[in-house]
Image: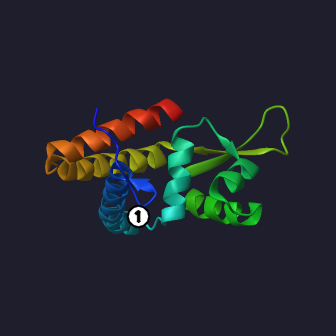
Amino acid sequence: MKTIQKQGGTDNDAERLADFVLFTQRSCILNLASELNKGNVSFPQFFLLTYLSSEEYLTMSDIAKKMGHSTAAATGLVDRLEKLNYVERVHAAEDRRKIMVRITTHGLELVSKMRGKIATNLSDVMSEMDEEEADTVHHARTALNRTI
């Protein structure tokens, strides 16, 4: 494993990883924007769909908390996604007043398609890395996996 050298309070690997994240984020967001615009989906709506794709359902308060929005704003996000048939609202069996939101098959298809595009984009970027850059990303991914 490479020795980490301190430079101005941060290490070289962290700085290089930050550059990689910023570059790939910019690249991914540009590609995502054009694809999401075709389906009239905003970034916050897409981020909500990605949350929902990994959960059975989320309540409105769960959505508001995860998105850092008010419950009213979360309701607006859900309303628009429901009109596009990406999510649906269902009542909890134990308390009909409780509304749960779950992703539809149509929503899962969008998330899957976009994940595929992101993976392809990242693969393209990573294929142009030199060995040291690839090692930096690998070590960071390993460390992140331990903390998640």
Query: Residue, x 34% and y 65% (percent of image)?
Result: 26
Query: Residue, x 84% and y 32% (percent of image)?
Result: 94
Q: Is residue 15 left or right of residue 49?
A: left
Tell me the element at label 1. loop
Neighbour class for label 1 at 10 Å: few (<14), some, many (≥20)?
few
Query: Residue, x 65% and y 51% (percent of image)?
Result: 66
Q: Residue 145 at x, y = what percent? A: 45, 33
* Quadrant where the N terminus is found in the figure: top left
User: To which residue does mark 1 refer?
Assistant: 39
Question: Camera-side residue: 40 or 137?
Answer: 137
Q: Is residue 147 left or right of residue 96?
A: left
Location of residue 10 by image quarter: bottom left
Q: Residue 37 at x, y = what percent? A: 39, 69
Specify whether residue 85 is in view: no
Judge whether 53 appears above or below 86 on screen.
above
* Residue type of the residue flagged with mark 1: Gly
Judge whether 2 appears above or below 34 on screen.
above
Judge whether 31 appears above or below 105 on screen.
below
Q: Is residue 72 left or right of residue 25?
A: right
**Colour scheme of this structure image?**
rainbow
Q: Residue 30 at x, y = what percent? A: 32, 67
Question: Camera-side residue: 140 or 58?
Answer: 140
Question: Camera-side residue: 22 or 85?
Answer: 22
Question: Camera-side residue: 89 or 131?
Answer: 131
Q: Residue 131 at x, y = what percent? A: 16, 42
